[in-house]
Image (spheres, rainbow, N blue to C red):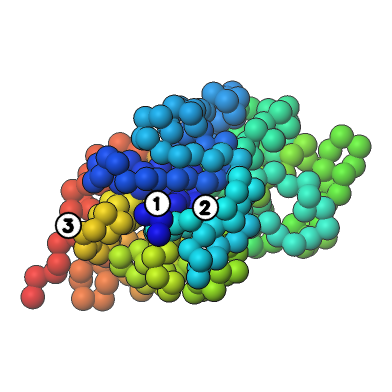
């Protein structure tokens, strides 16, 4: 029986897992299969590539060959895994069939694209590979429509605006970052973007896109039409769980795992953007790192359970950077907010007076860690 640890995927979660596996065991055979080039890049930098005028290759930090050599792994880039034979304990791929002792799914997530006529004209920026395909179009575009006013959409809007482009954001919600921020702070950020020239269309959506000469004509749900040079979709990500489904692994919102990162099938695990932990998707770097540390221990004979503290989320909008934790959009919280020219300090309290969330911005970012520590501390009884 093979003792190989086989990992499907080469994104942040997979790379963290390889790193921590090698810290636990220098010799266990590790095989990585991934559909992309397996070059390492910093995915959050995709929110700033246009204003910095970065080419896709500029993002590469370490080539696939360098990674394979440094970690002593068997690496198969540009490889598509077609299915998993859980009885024979093998994965079938375009590079051949491989036996596994333990299998890890780190398949990530794919951008959600709205179903409408002309959806093939939409750009997405979820990977270096996607950016490589649309970099020229975005660099040359003067007018850009961004579908989605969430975390990525807001960051991209500010970056494209800083690059001198005419930017329009459209979202069916009532404001920027409506699922992350209290309305008062969302409004402050929205005001900053409007003052810098970003146009906003809320409580409406795109119903159709069509090529019109050298531009893209967008039709909106209110009947209005406008032309743009590029359209970027940033309405969210959907876990890439198709491979797991075909193998009979339990999938709900994502690939269901327990606190050991084990799926419903023996010796198969999942982590990162594709995994659903206790009913939640956690597409952030901190939980992926903690999951990798936990799983590395479990794959090398230890017994570890994932514990997730309150997470600090950074909103990379240079004109008004934000850090937040808890559930700041929860309407049940009572807020204490201090606004000044230096930024915002906002604390959200539950009906019992316990701080459950906070948001800080600009010059007050330095207090985020002390507030996070307070958020970690159980309320006195």
Badge 3 or badge 2: first in the primary sequence: 2
Secondary structure category for the residue under label 3:
helix
**Which residue is pictured at 48% across the width and 28% down the height?**
65
Query: Which residue bears the numbered disc 3?
Result: 374
Real-space CA distance between mark 1 and mark 2, rounded to the nearest whole angstrom: 9 Å
- Residue 359 to residue 275: above or below: above
- The residue that mark 1 highlights is 4
Q: Are marks 1 and 3 in contact (CB under 8 Å)?
A: no
The residue where tag 2 is placed is 98
201 and 156: which is toward the camera: 156
Any part of residue 297 in sight: yes
First-in-chain label (1 vs 3): 1
Q: Which mark is on residue 134?
A: none
Q: On the rendered structure, is 196 left or right of 138? A: left
Q: Are marks 1 and 2 in contact (CB under 8 Å)?
A: yes
Cα gap from disc 1 to disc 3, whole angstroms: 43 Å
Q: Is residue 331 visible?
A: no
**Left or right of 30: which side holds 300?**
left
The quarter of the image holding the C terminus is bottom left
Secondary structure, mark 1, is: loop
Q: Secondary structure at mark 2?
A: strand
Mark 1 or 3: the one toward you: 1
Camera-side residue: 85 or 110? 85
Cβ atoms under marks 3 and 2 closer than 8 Å: no
User: Residue at position x 40%, y 29% from top?
Assistant: 69
- In the figure, 337 relative to 231: above or below? below
Q: Position of residue 225 (x, y in %)?
A: 83, 51
Q: Where residue 301 appears, x then y in whole percent? A: 24, 58
Residue 325, quarter of the rendered image: bottom left
Mark 1 or mark 2: which comes first in sequence? Answer: 1
- Of badges 3 and 2, nearer the viewer stands 2
Residue at the farthest right position: 213
């Amino acid at each position: 029986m093979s003792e190989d640890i086989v990992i499907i995927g080469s994104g942040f979660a997979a790379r963290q897992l390889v790193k921590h596996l090698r810290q636990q065991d220098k010799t266990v055979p590790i095989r990585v299969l991934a559909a992309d080039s397996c070059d390492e890049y910093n995915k959050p930098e995709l929110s700033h590539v246009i204003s910095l005028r970065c080419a896709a290759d500029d993002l590469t930090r370490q080539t696939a060959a360098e990674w394979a050599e440094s970690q002593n792994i068997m690496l198969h880039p540009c490889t598509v895994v077609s299915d998993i034979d859980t009885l024979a304990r093998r994965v079938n791929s375009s590079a051949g069939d491989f036996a596994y002792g333990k299998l890890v799914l780190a398949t990530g997530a794919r951008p959600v694209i709205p179903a409408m006529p002309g959806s093939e004209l939409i750009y997405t920026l979820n990977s270096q590979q996607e950016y490589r395909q649309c970099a020229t179009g975005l660099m040359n575009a003067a007018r850009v429509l961004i579908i989605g006013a969430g975390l990525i959409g807001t960051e991209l809007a500010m970056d494209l605006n800083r690059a001198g482009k005419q930017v329009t954001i459209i979202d069916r919600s009532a404001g920027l970052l409506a699922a992350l921020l209290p309305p008062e702070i969302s409004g402050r950020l929205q005001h900053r973007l409007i003052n810098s020239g970003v146009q906003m269309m809320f409580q409406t959506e795109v119903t159709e896109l069509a090529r019109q000469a050298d531009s893209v004509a967008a039709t909106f749900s209110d009947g209005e039409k406008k032309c743009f040079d590029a359209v970027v979709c940033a309405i969210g990500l959907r876990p890439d769980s198709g491979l797991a489904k075909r193998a009979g692994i339990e999938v709900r919102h994502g690939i269901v795992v327990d606190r050991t990162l084990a799926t419903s099938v023996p010796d198969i695990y999942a982590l990162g953007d594709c995994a659903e932990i206790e009913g939640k998707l956690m597409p952030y770097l901190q939980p992926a790192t903690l999951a990798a540390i936990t799983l590395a221990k479990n794959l090398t004979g230890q017994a570890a359970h994932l514990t997730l503290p309150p997470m600090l989320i950074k909103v990379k909008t240079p004109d008004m950077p934000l850090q937040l934790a808890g559930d700041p959009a929860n309407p049940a919280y009572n807020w204490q907010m201090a606004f000044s020219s230096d930024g915002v300090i906002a604390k959200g309290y539950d009906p019992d007076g316990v701080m459950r969330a906070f948001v800080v911005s600009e010059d007050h970012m330095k207090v985020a860690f002390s507030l996070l520590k307070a958020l970690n501390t159980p309320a006195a009884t």
